[in-house]
Each structure stands twice: as C-alpha cells, then as structure tokens.
Image: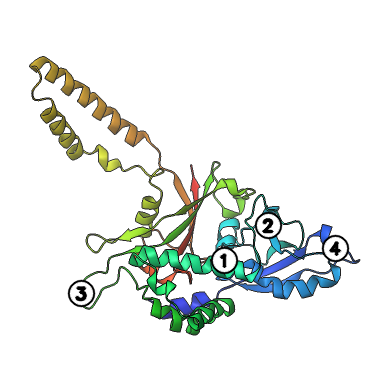
Amino acid sequence: MDMEAQNFLWKGAIPLQIHLHESKVTTLPSPPPALILAPRLGYLPLLASHLKPYFSSALPPGVDTIWFEYKGLPLKWYIPTGVLFDLLCAEAERPWNLTVHFRGYPGNILIPCEGEDSIKWSFINSLKEAAYIINGNCKNVMNMSQPDQVELWRSVLHGNFEAYQRVSSKLKLGAVGEIDDSGQVKQGRVPVRLYVWNVSEDFDDLEDAPPIDSWDKVSYINRPVEIQGEGRCFTLYDAVKILLPDYFVDKSLGTAESLTVGRDDYGQRISSKDASDDKKAKEEVETLCDDHVKASYEYEEPKIKLVRIQGIEPKLEIPFSWVANNLMHPEHFLHICVYLKL
C-alpha cells in the first residue's frame, strides 16, 4: 500500500458552489451561493453545519431536512461526494454547482437521512460488509471498542488520515495482490461498488455526454472481485469484465479447442445410438457450434467510454491490485464509475 497515495486521496476536495433553492428563499435579495471545499471522501449532508447558519436568515420556519440536487436530480446522501461528482460530471465542473433544500424531502427517491447519525451507521455497516468480504467475517469491526469507533468516525468526519490509520490497522483488512514475505502473491477478495451509466448515443468529447437526469439510468452493482495469486497480471479491465458478465462475452468459448471438447463430450453421450443417429447428431452439433462461433464474433462488445476512480481516469491495463490497495475508500470499498456505450 502506497501511504503517499493514500495521504493524497485523503486531502482531495471538490470546490462547491451551493445555491439555496429559490422556493425556500424568504428574503430579498436572495442570499449569494455558499462556496465550500467538500472532502472527496465525505458526504454532502455533513455540510449542514456550514450551510444552515449561512442560509438561516433566508429560510422559512419549520423542520430542517437537508438534501441536495444537481440539475434537478436529487443526490443520494450515502454515496461519497467524490463518487457523485465522478459519476454525474462527465466533464469536470469546477466549481460544482449544487442546489440545497431544507424542506420538501423527496422520500419517493431518497431513503430517509436523520443527519450525521444516519451517515455514521451507513458507513459502519459498509465497513462490516467489506470486512466480511475480505476476511469471511466481520468480528474485528463488531468488536471495536467504543472509543475506537468514535475515533474512526471522527477521522473520516475531519479527514484525519493519521487517526484513521491508527484505528483501521486494528481491523486487519490487509492489502491484496502484493508480494508477501514468502515471495507469494497475496490472494484476496476486493469489495467493489460499481456505478454503470449505459449511454445509447456515442460521443467523442466528455463535454458532449448527455446528463444523467434519473437514477434509473445508473446501474448499481455491489460485487466482490477475487484476485488470484497465479497467472498473468490481473488488470482493471479484467475486473470490469468480471463485474459486468452480461456485457462482455467470452469469445474464447468459440475457439477450436472448446469446439473439439464439446463434440467429443457429445459423442460420448450418444455412443450407444445407431450409426445413422450418431451421424445426424454430430451434424447438428457442428451446426450449433458454427452458429455459436458466428454469434460470438458478430456480437459487438460495449465500448468503455470512461472509467473513473477517486477522480482519476486510470488506464485499463493498470494492475487491479494497485487500484484496490491505493484507491479504496475509508469503508474499504472500491467505488468505480463506468460509462458504457451500448
């Protein structure tokens, strides 16, 4: 694990220009937008402590329930701020213009958020899930002392990487794909959250990409990727293909070797039949195999227009183990945003 890379990620921030929704303004003139540097690893509702005092004089009386939108799309509060930015802004928008609401929570689109406690327990539950994927159990997370749990959450809340390291090291969620003391590559499972935007129309420049105006256009895949200790280098592209088996057809199924095996197996199953039936069956198998080869090569794989992780657009040939060990979020999930042209 590259500590310098981790430290760099923890310092990452996105400049936000946050406007109060016009329907919530009770004063004239309207308050100017708030300018905030939001931590990439943080969560938008945690900005409430800054935004509520800033806009308080313009708000109508009532119960405050903060939520955000971007170009009319309500933003899911449990997705880290940096992931939302990477997914929704094909062409980086700086500052990122968001609208904040303190009334009219869209409960038909967003699950309820009761402030910081909701975000904290969402984070802890994700950490438990990641621990189970990595170690086969989440005992170390479940057995965290109360002081450690408080320090861990505060380290995320305040972007304190050193404090986070002190506590998270006790959870024994080790790196994968690296060389251990015996010279062997460490095998392991990587918790991944994949956000896939399927684009029907093609575009050459990211600035021409159509906006995401509904969460129905985004596929959310929560699936681990297993890194094996043997064989060739396992790349980010390999991982994406494993995460999206419905989109990427394995053309190796159409090779001569696989066809030979298929025919031999079929021949063994029909060896007790009459010679005429055997000949007819083999002809049918050959036809089916030829059709399979033709279909597999005529199938046009979707084009990966963009892969973005932690604001970085890495080459698909990069070793996946490096990505997993150095670009993971504090809850030990790797969040990957993918644009697919179908």
In this rendered view, identify the residue nearer to me: 96 or 143.
143
- The residue under label 4 is 25
Q: Residue at x 29, y 72 (%)?
A: 178
Residue 166 quadrant: bottom left
User: Residue 75 vs residue 64: left or right?
Assistant: left
Q: Earlier in the sequence, mark 3 or mark 4?
A: 4
**Badge number at residue 183:** 3
Eyeballing the image, is 210 above or below 274? Answer: below
- The residue under label 2 is 70
Local packing at callout 4 (Cα closer than 10 Å; few below 14, some 14-19, many 20+) is some
Q: Amino acid at mark 4?
A: Val
User: Residue 2 vs residue 120: left or right?
Assistant: left
Eyeballing the image, is 76 above or below 300? Answer: below
**Badge number at residue 82:** 1
Where disc 1 sits, the SS reads helix
Q: Earlier in the sequence, mark 4 or mark 2?
A: 4
Q: Amino acid at mark 3?
A: Gly
Q: Earlier in the sequence, mark 1 or mark 3?
A: 1
- Residue 185 on image: x %, y %: 25, 69
Q: Residue at x 22, y 39 (%)?
A: 255
**Badge number at residue 135:** none
Eyeballing the image, is 120 above or below 87? Answer: below
User: Residue 32 vs residue 100: left or right?
Assistant: right
Inter-mark Cα distance, 3 to 4: 64 Å
Q: Quadrant of the N terminus?
A: bottom left
Q: Residue at x 58, y 46 (%)?
A: 216
Disc 4 to disc 2: CB gap under 8 Å: no
Disc 2 to disc 1: CB gap under 8 Å: no
Where disc 2 sits, the SS reads strand
